[in-house]
Amino acid sequence: MAEILALDDVQDATVLIGKILTKKGHTVHTFTEEDEAIAYAKANKIDLAILDIKLKKMSGVEVLGLLKADTPAMHAIMLTGYPTVETAREAISLGADEYCVKPIDRDELEEKVEKVLKGKEKKCSNCKI
């Protein structure tokens, strides 16, 4: 299954994401601090990052840009309690695959994670890894 990084400034949100996706067989690494999440992603293989757009020190979109600079093949799902067309466009332009609105809906999160990860498999079916 996938190695997933979850970053949200609200610990309860990361705990919820971890519980939902661990039950699906994924390994979930949860963070509430941007610096820790970025450092972890630089040192470890991450298949999917789930990032809140509103964080403490920087935006989730900025974190996405940094993570994608190091690992362009990594997939991303953005979370927000304040959806706007501008934020969605910016996140997608930086390489986010999906966008979820908070509060987190278990079924929606499971469905979008599965969709993103299956898309990865399709894109890499011809990869020589």
Image (cartoon, helix red, strand yellow):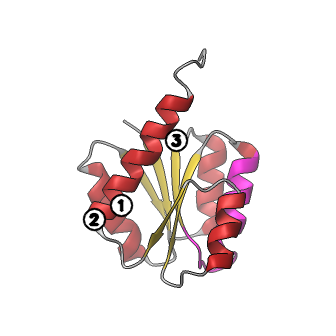
Q: Contact, CB < 8 Å: mark 1 with mark 2?
A: yes
Dot 2, how many residues are within 10 Å of its Cα: few (below 14), some (14-19), or many (20+)?
few
Number of numbered labels in the structure image: 3
Give the residue displayed 59% in from the left and 17% down from the top. Answer: 129
**Element at label 1:** helix
Residue at label 1? 109
Residue at label 3? 47
In 3D space, how far apart are the residues under numbered discs 1 and 2 (Cα atoms)?
5 Å
The residue type indicated by label 1 comes to Leu
In 3D space, how far apart are the residues under numbered discs 3 and 2 (Cα atoms)?
20 Å
Say whether residue 91 is left or right of residue 122: right
The residue mark sitting in front, 1 or 3, is: 1
Q: Which residues are magenta?
A: 52-69
Q: Considering depth in this image, is 15 or 104 the residue closer to the camera?
A: 104
The residue type indicated by label 3 comes to Asp
Q: Is residue 55 magenta?
A: yes
Residue 106 has which mark? Answer: 2
Q: Considering depth in this image, is 23 or 29 the residue closer to the camera?
A: 23
Return the x and y of residue 14 as percentages of the image width and height. Answer: 40, 67
**Element at label 3:** loop
Say whether residue 46 is left or right of residue 92: left
Say whether residue 29 is left or right of residue 65: left
Return the x and y of residue 78 as percentages of the image width and height. Answer: 54, 65
In what quadrant of the picture does the N terminus appear? top left
The residue type indicated by label 2 comes to Arg
